[in-house]
Image: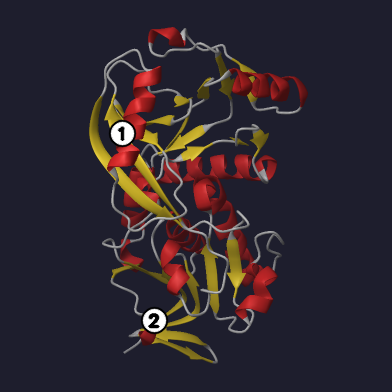
Amino acid sequence: MQEKVKYLIVGQGLVGTWMAYYLQEKGIPFKIINNTQLPSASSVASGVINPVTGRRMVQTWMIETVLPFVVDAYNQFQEKAGVAIIKKAPVALIHPSLQMKESFDYRLAHENVYLLKSDTPNWKSFFITPFGTGEIGSCYWIDLVQFLKTGREKIKDHYLEATFEMEDLKLNSNGVEWKNLNAEKIIFCDGVQAMENPFFKALPFAPNKGEALIVDIPGLPNKNIYKNNVSIVPWKENLFWVGASFEWKYENANPTNSFKEKMISSLDSILTIPYKIVDHIVGIRPANTERRPFVGLHPTYPQIGICNGMGTKGCSLAPYFTLELINHIEMATAINKEANVERFKHLLA
């Protein structure tokens, strides 16, 4: 006997979890297939939502629309789950150079509404600050470990721990079949695995390897994110996530001594208090050359969809675009043109 659902979701990372959450909220039948043994960028990401990006300190793409939406989404998830998921965490900028301080001062005076003069405590108790400090407001930290765990628990009746094998997928006029599952749509939310997907591998993926250290820094307040040449992000209790690297050319997904040594050097150059490294983690981000998501249905096979390519902005983009894709399928609403996979119709066809 085949089990019939409307949606089959592949992958339970950040995107897949939000897809399942919204479908469950709408009462739409689905099944999610996930292999916890596969590398997941979501499980090792910092969990930061930051409205400012880059050395030029410009506002991130669509932030005015996305930020209020996703803060509300995480708060609703948190309230319904009864566990802490999201918290405000302003970024304390420890300016690494005079040039960066001047760039901050210029943006502060001209156009960036999220930048603030530093009204934080005296960070000199913890950091070396030869070029002063600043602050980015409206920043948040998402406990991704808890989010993914809680998300899986909430959808346990729809969850299938398995490896998705493409050769078992069959297309028909009414949708798709996979083993004993029958669905109207299959949505791939499986991160870098999509690069091997015959339906979507022509997309301009540009995956990059990210490494981070988990560091015990007793005494450092965990109500802020700290940013210099590295980011120091609250993780658990006295633990902080420190990173990250962006390696576009890499041989494997293993931790490297070169990254660890670089982070130690960076921490030694800014921290005035002792610390201890407790872990070294690695993830491969499903980024792309355009730095815009891949969202939508395949132009030739409309029963197949994708929600992927969020890159480093996954925490802010995933809730927004998963719901946008669901609404597109259910109510024929539009997908943002810059994110719609339709823009690569010539490649996918």
Please tell me which of labels 2 and 1 falls first in the chain. Answer: 2
Visible residue check, residue 29: no
> Which of the numbered marks, if any, corresponds to residue 226?
none
Residue 273 in the image: above or below residue 347:
above
Q: What x and y, as percent, mark residue 174?
A: 53, 89
Other-residue count near label 1 (Cα within 10 Å), few / some / many at <14 / 14–19 / ≥20:
few
> Which of the numbered marks, if any, corresponds to residue 166?
2
254 or 219: nearer the eye?
A: 254
Residue 18 in the image: above or below residue 130:
below
Q: Quadrant of residue 330?
A: bottom right
At horizontal 68% and vertical 44% (from top left) the residue drawn is: 65
Residue furthest to the right: 110
At horizontal 36% and vertical 56% (from top left) the residue drawn is: 40
Q: What x and y, as percent, mark residue 312?
A: 51, 47
Q: Amino acid at mark 2?
A: Met
Residue for badge 1 = 261
Other-residue count near label 2 (Cα within 10 Å), few / some / many at <14 / 14–19 / ≥20:
few
Residue 149 in the image: above or below residue 334:
above
Helix, strand or loop for disc 1: helix
Q: For the N terminus, which image quadrant?
A: bottom left
At horizontal 61% and vertical 78% (from top left) the residue drawn is: 348
At horizontal 45% and vertical 57% (from top left) the residue drawn is: 21
Count the marks. 2
Helix, strand or loop for disc 2: helix
Q: Quadrant of residue 128?
A: top left
Q: What x and y, as percent, mark residue 331?
A: 66, 69
Q: Amino acid at mark 1?
A: Glu
Q: For the C terminus, which image quadrant?
A: bottom right
Disc 2 or disc 1, which is closer to the eye?
A: 1
Task: Answer with left or right where residue 112 lies relative to residue 167.
Answer: right
